[in-house]
Image: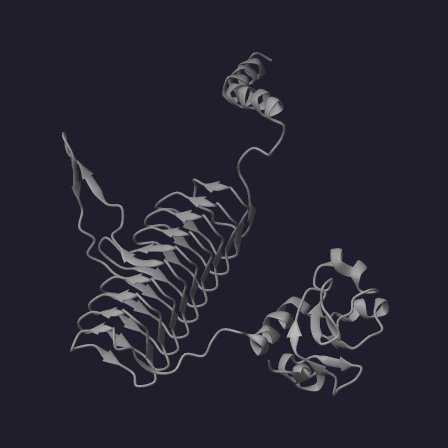
Amino acid sequence: MPSYSLDYIAKHIEAELVGDSQYKISGLNTIEKADSAELTFLANPLYKQFLSCTKAGAVIISRSGLSDYSGNALVVDSPYLAYALVSALFNKAPIVAAGIHQTAVIAVSAKISKTAAIGPNVVLGENVTIGASCQVGANTTIGDGSILGDYCKIYSNVSIYHGVTIGSETIVHSGAVIGADGFGFARSPNHWTKIHQLGGVVIGKRVEIGACTTIDRGALGDTVIEDGVIFDNHVQIAHNVYVGENTAIAGCSGISGSTVVGKNCIFAGQTGVSGHLKICDNVQITGGSIARQSISEPGSYSSGIMLTHTKKWKKNAVRFNELNDLAQRLNALEKKI
């Protein structure tokens, strides 16, 4: 297990060091559970109560918190960001050696960097390109003509269809499906007729795609995910959706077809967005909300009925269904007055 001096860590996260510069740290832990060889952080004021009793060897902390703590400290403006940066030093993910596993099935026309690592039972189609230092996990399939930029990490059991382009330093977690057909069908009197999805998927740099997330290919043009976007697990991105830079979408959310989402948006868990809408930059949608109209002004948006006791909820639901009638009666009364 690696260990680092506080001086080294301070330089890594650009922190001001207060205390013993040569003190050794060998891990990270929560402020309640950290021991003397571990580093912790204080980002949420709710955990300030633990400062006086933490056993951590050092705490990443803001300057305002120093008055309540006398031990080794790494002082930064944003403790949570500093924690994210220092976590890279203690990452326990195994290092995968470059090379192609003997069980991989690879088309003759595929182009694979000599520094890439291709795992067991991987299938690479015709004209696939795998960039430098990419890792492709066991049982993953990559369809014809798809491209991985440099330093991508594709975990096991990922399905990447044909005609998908993925930018450098992108991470795709297990079970994700990229480039599946969009949900396009035309209704006839007796059955549904499939609309063949002729577009692809274009994913930018430094994107992270959670486990079991699906990004559908475009019907005509491409589905586009810009640089720095992060998707949690079980997110559904429909055909021809556009997601702007650095937007974050949490688990079990779904974006319907042809919707455009701006930059730096945050959608909490179980968010739903209807199709053919435009969501401007810097919009936050709270958990469980459904956006049925376009949003043209930045800010926080919510929908739905708040959780309450079932008996009370039933009464409120009845009142909700009466709102339109009440509004019409009120309008009628106002006209008479």
Q: In which quarter of the image is the C terminus?
A: top right
Residue 324 visible in the displayed image = yes
Q: Quadrant of the N terminus?
A: bottom right
Residue found at x 75% / y 58%: 47
Q: In this view, does 293 lie above or below 234?
A: above
Residue 79 x, y percent position in the rendering: 68, 69
Residue found at x 48% / y 45%: 270
**Which one is in front, 282 or 337?**
282
Q: Which scheme is used to colour this image of the protein? A: one colour
- Quadrant in the picture for residue 123: bottom left
Q: In this view, does 244 lie above or below 258?
A: below
Residue occupying the far top of the picture: 336
Residue 135 x, y percent position in the rendering: 37, 75
Residue found at x 42% / y 51%: 234
Residue 149 x, y percent position in the rendering: 34, 76
**Which one is in front, 3 or 243?**
3
Q: In this view, does 258 lie above or below 4?
A: above
How many labels, in total? Answer: 0
Residue occupying the far bottom of the picture: 22
Residue 76 visible in the displayed image = no
- Quadrant in the picture for residue 71: bottom right
**Which one is in front, 246 or 37?**
37
Residue 280 x, y percent position in the rendering: 46, 54
Residue occupying the far front of the picture: 102
Relative to residue 54, is residue 131 drawn left or right? left
